[in-house]
Image: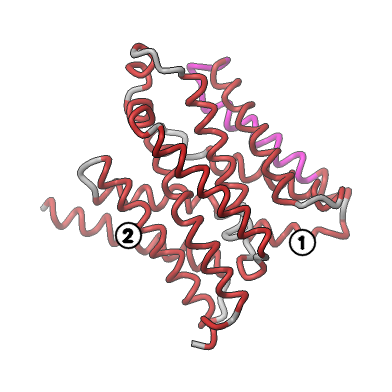
Amino acid sequence: MELLSAEFFQRALIGGALIAITAPLMGLFLVLRRLAMIGDTLAHVSIAGVALGFLINVYPVAVGLLFAIAASFGIEMLRKMYRTYAELSIAIIMSGGIALASLLFTMGKGFNLSVTSYLFGSIYTLDYTDIYVIMGVTVIVLSMVLIHKKELFLLTFDEDAAAVSGLPMKYFNIMLSILTALVISAAIKIVGALLVSALLTIPAACSLALSRSFKQAVILVVIIGEAAVLAGLWIAGVANLAPGGTIVLLLIGILAVSVASTKLIRT
């Protein structure tokens, strides 16, 4: 109970609970659109922005966010150029992000330890500025998803039908990319850039294995994300483990149980 009374742990719980809503939710849309790897790509580009933020002494998450948004536009542009080979856009942007991050690392050797915390996550160091940023991202993401839920459903399951029906495809594709960039930028300090993709994709994999409808999948993905993040934080705090790694391993455990239970039901 002493852990719950600690202010740093309370901030960690608030930040974790908020990102556990938005990251799995956006991840579900990405997985259904076969864009699961976009999370890794934007996370690596965000790290380049974080490194630049430390280098120029500007709030790192804000610079990382700008980099992620720019990368999301780049991915969308390349997807249109290489329609038959859409995955090329992800590979190209990811390569550029890693290259730029490594270059900035060599330019700022004095802050490499600080940047490393963004690679592996540092949820216990969240301050009130971080919390407000995560809250803002949560409000924006949930608002846009609720406002455009019908359009996003159609776009996710049948992009061609969405285009024929007259939906502004460019707007919605860019909107989803920007929302994903917002979530990833907010999440990298919680689970780290190297693990943020797991928070996007594994809850989605669990919910898709267990649900029978899109509505069920949306509800389950948030429940699973919340359960894994909050339980992972508690276990990590009590056992003095790395929070990001604990959350991801717990998610993998939930996925294993989900897949096993689904097979048992079907047999």
Mark positioned earlier in the residue sequence (1 or 2):
1
The boundaries of the magenta stretch are 81-102
**Viewer-proximal residue among 132 and 233:** 132
Pinpoint residue 65: horizontal percent, then vertical percent.
Answer: 67, 43
Nearer to us in this view, 106 or 153: 153
Residue sitting at the far bottom:
2
Tell me the residue that label 2 is attached to: 256
Residue 26, percent across and down? Answer: 45, 43
How far across and how far down the image is residue 248, in percent?
48, 61
Which numbered disc, 1 or 2, marks the residue closer to the eye? Answer: 1
Question: x, y (%) of residue 230?
Answer: 45, 68
- The amino acid at mark 1 is Ser
- Identify residue type, mark 2: Ala
- Determine the residue positioned at 40% across, 60% down: 252
Q: Which mark is residue 95?
A: none
Figure quadrant of residue 167 = top left
Find disc 1 in the rendering and name its residue. Answer: 114
Secondary structure under the numbered disc 1 in the rendered image: helix
Spot the residue most to the left.
267
Q: Residue at x 53, y 88 (%)?
A: 2
Does residue 206 sit above or below 230 in this rendering? Answer: above
- How far, Cα to Cα, is label 1 from label 2? 34 Å
Say what secondary structure mark 2 lies in.
Answer: helix
Predominant SS of the magenta segment: helix
The one nearer the camera, 195 or 46, is: 46
Of residue 145 and residue 82, the one placed in the foreground of this image is 145
The answer to if 178 sits in the magenta stretch is no
* Residue 181 vertical position relative to residue 119 in the rendered view, above or below: above
